[in-house]
Image: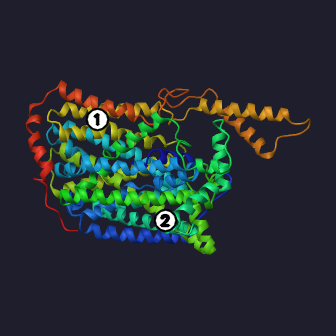
């Protein structure tokens, strides 16, 4: 999802409920709502324009194949750059320096996999959905059914995380009611998809990507101006910052390392300040790089272009945009560390997710107080547009799987006219969007961070193996598709459910017990009659409360501690998905699948059989 997107969305969602603990960041409601209304007006006008052009199933699912490579590249970037990556990466860099930057590299590298493996073949061999690719030379009904279940699962996991993030973000920044925020986002995304289909969704994503790049570029220029546009001065400011030095010293002290002064400042620009478990990093990297190529809403984007060349061009353009975006977020993260300071950032949000917004407000206020309000309002509206664009793509992917794969091709056996197909797509989109609203409201007080890990884990462990083998292995068949999807999906979900991503009350209680012991020891060491200061007294009260609530508690699976030590299961579940797909294909040979491989090979390399594009 992207976010996705993975650890960043996890950290983003985990931190949201704890925002404004020691300080607050509130956008000017009048200015912010004005920006929101402008964005909504622009996007709704796009929907009205798109609705007039959406007449067939090809129009609804793939914009009639008439999106240019450049437009699709911007749309892919808009679909991929989530609020988690926008706020989370810069926030992580502002608190952990180099390690935060390494996450942005992962997002970019993921698209090399997409470019080299799936972009052109999927565009040439498929039609609208993941099921189209997998069912071409297999038994279509069982394959489409299983593929649709996988698609809906991935989309639901990611959609729920996005909806909860949207509700909490709007509630905290603008003061909107959580439920009202969820309903508002839901109604807009339903309108975009039901009436405008892929054409409207594409242009909403393009608009969002343009806004995001504009905001990041403007702030980066202001950050660069502070250093006289001198990169040497910029990094010297990091190393010599007393606040960064103090922050790094405290981080290292947790590991028993003493470091102060410029040595601590230099350490901020070196690896392993945050990511200290190599195996977890490798597993996360595998899920991110391979999961992106298996995300249904990303795969759908390659059916919207008229030629294979346009598919390749769209990925290259998306890589450039995404690459430039993450370079800019790197500048913003380091800029926030220098000008807002890690202490100022963590006072508002312990996870660092508000770093970019705080930086925008501060840099704008240096020009004039109202400019600070305008900058903050603009970025809040960009975050809002970002969430709208991502959830619209997810709803479209899920509704396509249900309407096109299940209803049209399984239930109706492919015998449905264009009007019936479009009606099925719109009704399904309405139902999926409504369910997204209901789930988002129901999950308000739930820890949904693990759902992001689930989305990427299922995409990389279930979807990608069967897509790759369907396109490139002659022996692959129906049994292989079903085994790969089922085993990869179950393995990834099962491992996440017993991983550290879940909430373990007993662990919370054990941590609280250590705090209680430390505070009681501190109290005992004070002179007779003296008491703990206010901060320590509150920490003691909170620790006792946490211990009482969580002692003896278990996770939703009845566990007191994780059975699987890694936060992301990719290093285990991805090989299992490939192995299951290969063994299933070898165990149940299918002559028709092997005979049709030549046709698939020709289609994926030439595009023969693809419908002609519609001019948009």
Label 2 packing within 10 angstroms: few (<14), some (14-19), many (20+): many
Of 30 and 604, which appears nearest the observer?
604
Q: Position of residue 285 (x, y in %)?
A: 40, 41
Residue 557: mark:
none
At 52% from the left edge and 46% from the top edge, which residue is drawn?
A: 11
Q: Position of residue 444 (x, y in %)?
A: 52, 47
Label 1 packing within 10 angstroms: few (<14), some (14-19), many (20+): many
- Residue 76 visible somewhere in the drawing: no
Badge 2 marks a residue whose secondary structure is helix
- Report whether 599 appears left or right of 378: left
Q: How many marks?
A: 2
Q: Position of residue 509 (x, y in %)?
A: 64, 31
Of 210 and 201, which appears nearest the observer?
210
Position of 425 relative to 491 (above/below)? below
- Residue 577 visible somewhere in the drawing: yes
At 22% from the left edge and 55% from the top edge, which residue is drawn?
A: 303
Q: Quadrant of the C terminus?
A: bottom left
- Report whether 453 appears left or right of 131: right
Q: Residue furthest right?
A: 528
At 51% from the left edge and 31% from the top edge, which residue is drawn?
A: 556
Residue tagged 2: 381
Residue 485: mark:
1
Q: Position of residue 136 (x, y in %)?
A: 15, 43
Quadrant location of residue 46? Answer: bottom left
Badge 1 marks a residue whose secondary structure is helix
Tell me the colour scheme of the image.
Answer: rainbow
N-terminal of the pair, mark 2 or mark 1, is 2
Give the spatial CA distance, label 2 vs label 1.
38 Å
- Report whether 10 appears left or right of 572: right
Of 365 and 64, which appears nearest the observer?
365
Of 274 and 62, which appears nearest the observer?
274
């Amino acid at each position: 999802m992207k976010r996705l997107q993975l650890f960043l969305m996890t950290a983003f969602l985990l931190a949201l409920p704890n925002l404004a603990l020691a300080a607050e960041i509130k956008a000017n409601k009048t200015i912010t709502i004005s920006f929101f209304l402008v964005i909504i007006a622009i996007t709704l006008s796009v929907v009205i324009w798109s609705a007039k052009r959406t007449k067939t199933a090809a129009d609804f699912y793939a914009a009639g194949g008439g999106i240019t490579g450049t437009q699709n590249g911007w749309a892919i970037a808009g679909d991929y750059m989530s609020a988690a990556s926008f706020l989370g990466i810069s926030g992580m860099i502002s608190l952990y320096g180099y390690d935060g930057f390494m996450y942005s590299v992962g997002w970019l590298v993921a698209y090399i996999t997409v470019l080299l493996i799936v972009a052109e073949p999927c565009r040439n061999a498929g039609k609208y959905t993941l099921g189209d690719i997998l069912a071409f030379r297999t038994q279509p009904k069982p394959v489409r059914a299983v593929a649709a279940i996988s698609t809906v699962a991935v989309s639901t996991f990611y959609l729920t995380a996005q909806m909860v993030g949207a509700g909490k973000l709007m509630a905290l920044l603008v003061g909107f009611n959580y439920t009202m925020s969820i309903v508002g986002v839901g109604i807009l995304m339903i309108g975009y998809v039901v009436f405008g289909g892929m054409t409207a969704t594409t242009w909403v994503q393009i608009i969002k990507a343009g806004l995001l790049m504009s905001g990041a570029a403007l702030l980066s220029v202001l950050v660069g101006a502070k250093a006289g546009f001198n990169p040497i001065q910029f990094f010297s400011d990091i190393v010599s910052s007393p606040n960064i030095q103090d922050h790094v010293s405290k981080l290292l002290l947790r590991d028993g390392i003493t470091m102060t002064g410029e040595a601590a400042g230099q350490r901020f620009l070196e690896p392993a300040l945050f990511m200290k478990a190599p195996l977890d990093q490798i597993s996360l990297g595998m899920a991110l790089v391979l999961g992106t190529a298996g995300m249904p809403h990303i795969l759908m984007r390659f059916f919207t272009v008229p030629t294979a060349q346009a598919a390749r061009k769209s990925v290259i353009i998306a890589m450039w945009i995404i690459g430039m975006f993450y370079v800019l977020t790197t500048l913003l993260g380091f800029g926030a560390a220098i000008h807002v300071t890690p202490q100022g950032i963590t006072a508002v949000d312990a996870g660092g997710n508000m770093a970019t917004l705080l930086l925008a407000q501060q840099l704008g206020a240096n020009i004039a107080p109202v400019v600070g309000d305008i900058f903050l309002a603009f970025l809040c509206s960009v975050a809002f547009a970002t969430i709208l664009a991502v959830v619209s793509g997810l709803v479209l992917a899920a509704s396509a799987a249900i309407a096109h794969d299940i209803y049209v091709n399984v239930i109706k056996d492919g015998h449905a006219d264009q009007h019936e197909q479009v009606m099925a797509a719109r009704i399904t989109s309405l139902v999926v969007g409504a369910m997204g609203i209901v789930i988002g409201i129901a999950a308000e007080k739930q820890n949904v961070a693990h759902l992001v890990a689930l989305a990427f884990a299922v995409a990389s462990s279930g979807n990608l193996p069967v897509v790759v083998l369907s396109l490139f292995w002659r022996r692959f068949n129906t049994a292989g598709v079903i085994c790969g999807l089922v085993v990869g999906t179950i393995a990834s979900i099962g491992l996440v459910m017993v991983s550290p991503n879940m909430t373990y009350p007993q662990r919370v209680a054990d941590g609280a017990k250590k705090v209680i012991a430390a505070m009681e020891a501190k109290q005992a060491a004070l002179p007779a009659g003296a008491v703990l200061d206010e901060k320590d007294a509150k920490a003691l009260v909170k620790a006792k409360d946490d211990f009482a609530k969580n002692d003896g508690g278990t996770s939703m699976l009845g566990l007191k501690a994780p059975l699987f030590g890694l936060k992301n299961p990719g290093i285990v579940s991805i090989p299992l998905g490939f192995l299951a797909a290969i063994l299933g294909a070898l165990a149940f040979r299918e002559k028709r699948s092997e005979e049709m491989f030549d046709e698939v090979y020709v289609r994926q390399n030439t595009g023969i059989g693809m419908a002609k594009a519609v001019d948009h």
